[in-house]
Amino acid sequence: MPKEDLLRLLRDPNLLLPEKQTLISDIAAQAAAMDMPCYLVGGFVRDLLLGERTNDLDIVVEGDAIKFGNALISKFGGTLTLHRKFHTAIWHLPETWNLVPDTLDLITVRKETYAESGALPTVTLASIEDDLRRRDFTINAMAIRIDGGHFGELLDPLGGRADLESGLIRVLHPGSFVDDPTRIFRAIRYEIRYSFSLHPSTLKLINSESLFVIQKLSGERIRHELDLIFEEEKSAQMILRAGELDLFKSIHLKLPLFNPDYFDFLEMDVILDIPASRTVIGYMLWLMDSSEDEILSIGRRLEFTSDLTYSAWAVSQLKKSLPFLKDSKPSVWTFALERLPLLSIYMVYLVTRENALLDFLSVWRHVKAHTTGDDLKARGLEPGPRFGEILTQLRAAWLDGDVKDKEQEIEYLNALL
Ligand code: ATP
């Protein structure tokens, strides 16, 4: 790619905010002063070449990133967090710069070797080409050199740009998925996000051998990849694709296909000020029709938090109990729903359109009797379990319309006492 074209992209304020452009120039000047080859790498380069706005900068140097980081903070301010083992540093940018994100990874080029399939890699120092070769796909394996006179040189030893233009996701070597099967999930994410295709030779590598290695991945690593999928705009298509490629059995034998009837709900906004996250919604919908045992076992495999397991369990239990609750009085609904997570109730409402669930979320859960424990004490009652029973009965009377104002509540209370 001609240098001028790349320089034009790097100076386009629609792709890269002027503040970020200044940051890159400052880093470039410092690298030149230290005679240290310095590169922008990975997703930043991919998105810039695609003409997409980019936010995250990843900086790689052929030299000691920690030394480089120290020079940057003494010149520009901010602080450093060091990871000596990996020769990397995180630069916490000066607060006054107000940049988002407010940190920047500074990485020493490195080469990774895998002691065992699915294990975390061993790292040794190397050249930028080695660094690019350890990456996942050609489209993520490009770098732009920025130090001094080299500013704006594209390094593309693996044909990333051609693949970007042809819309292809291609691994760098045949053992890539076996070395690290999280790349299978990443491949799907990029394929669907950019409406690309997996290169036929890469598609072939998603086979029994690489799927088998998924079984060796920790629950946390798999869940992280699934979380990233649920956070994407086209998450439904990604989950569909993961099912087509038969990924789920390798995660857990009982992990079902995602029900296509629920796809639309993945992208739906949650109303009523209920705190929600796309990932929690994703797992709730996925496991909605699973059994209690299955949910507990899948939750253990994917290292769900206890809250997440409980929320997914609540969804499936509630959906199963709807036929028994149907036509019940509001008080019965309310007392059955009260301890369940609001988001679980809302998801079951979306799927079943059972109006009582929406009534509970919007009205019934807020209904309370006026009478308090203190009022009962003032009437000479001894505090004890009977207190709770009376207050519950009063609340039920309000919910079921047997009491409509304060006077009626007092009459009702008198009758109870
Ligand atoms: P996204 O837009 O999805 O965040 P990204 O490229 O910024 O894309 P990161 O997960 O931040 O993705 O990773 C940064 C870079 O690190 C990638 O571009 C890729 O080159 C490399 N990388 C990330 N994960 C892997 C992996 N499992 N194997 C090899 N290289 C990886």
Image (cartoon, rainbow, N blue to C red):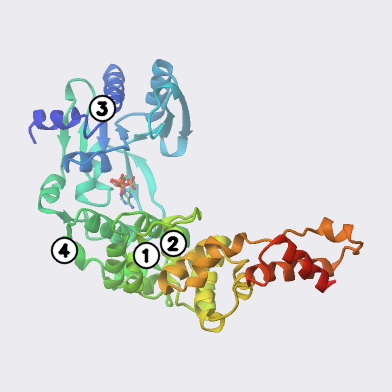
> 24 or 386: which is nearer to us?
386
Q: Of the residues under marks 3 and 4, which one precedes in the sequence?
A: 3
Closer mark to the observer between disc 2 and disc 3: 2
Would you identify the image quadrant in which residue 389 lies?
bottom right
Q: Which one is closest to the eye, mark 2 or mark 1?
A: 1
The residue pinned by badge 2 equals: 281
Between disc 2 and disc 1, whose residue precedes? 1
In x, y percent, where is residue 107?
A: 36, 35
Give the numbered dot on residue 201.
4
Which of marks 3 and 2 precedes in the sequence? 3
Q: Earlier in the sequence, mark 2 or mark 4?
A: 4
* Amino acid at pointer 4: Ser
Distance in Å between CA atoms under marks 3 and 4: 34 Å
Q: Nearer the viewer, residue 187 or 88?
A: 187
Can you see residue 217? no
Number of other residues with Cα within 10 Å of mark 1, as a class: few under 14, some 14 to 19, many 20 or more: some
Does residue 114 sit above or below 65 in this rendering?
below
Q: Name the mark nearer the viewer: 3 or 1.
A: 1
From the image, tell me which residue sits under label 3: 37
Label 2: how many residues lie within 10 Å, few (<14), some (14-19) or many (20+)? many
Residue 277 shown left or right of residue 387 in the figure: left
- State the CA–CA distance, disc 4 to disc 1: 34 Å
Element class at badge 2:
helix
Mark nearest the camera among 2 and 4 is 2
- Residue 265's label in the rendered image is 1
Residue drawn at point x = 32 percent, y = 38 percent: 56
- Quadrant that contains the N terminus: top left
Q: What secondary structure is found at the residue carrying circle 3?
A: loop
**Which of the marked residues, 3 or 1, is nearer the chain's N terminus?**
3
What's the residue type where badge 3 is placed? Answer: Pro
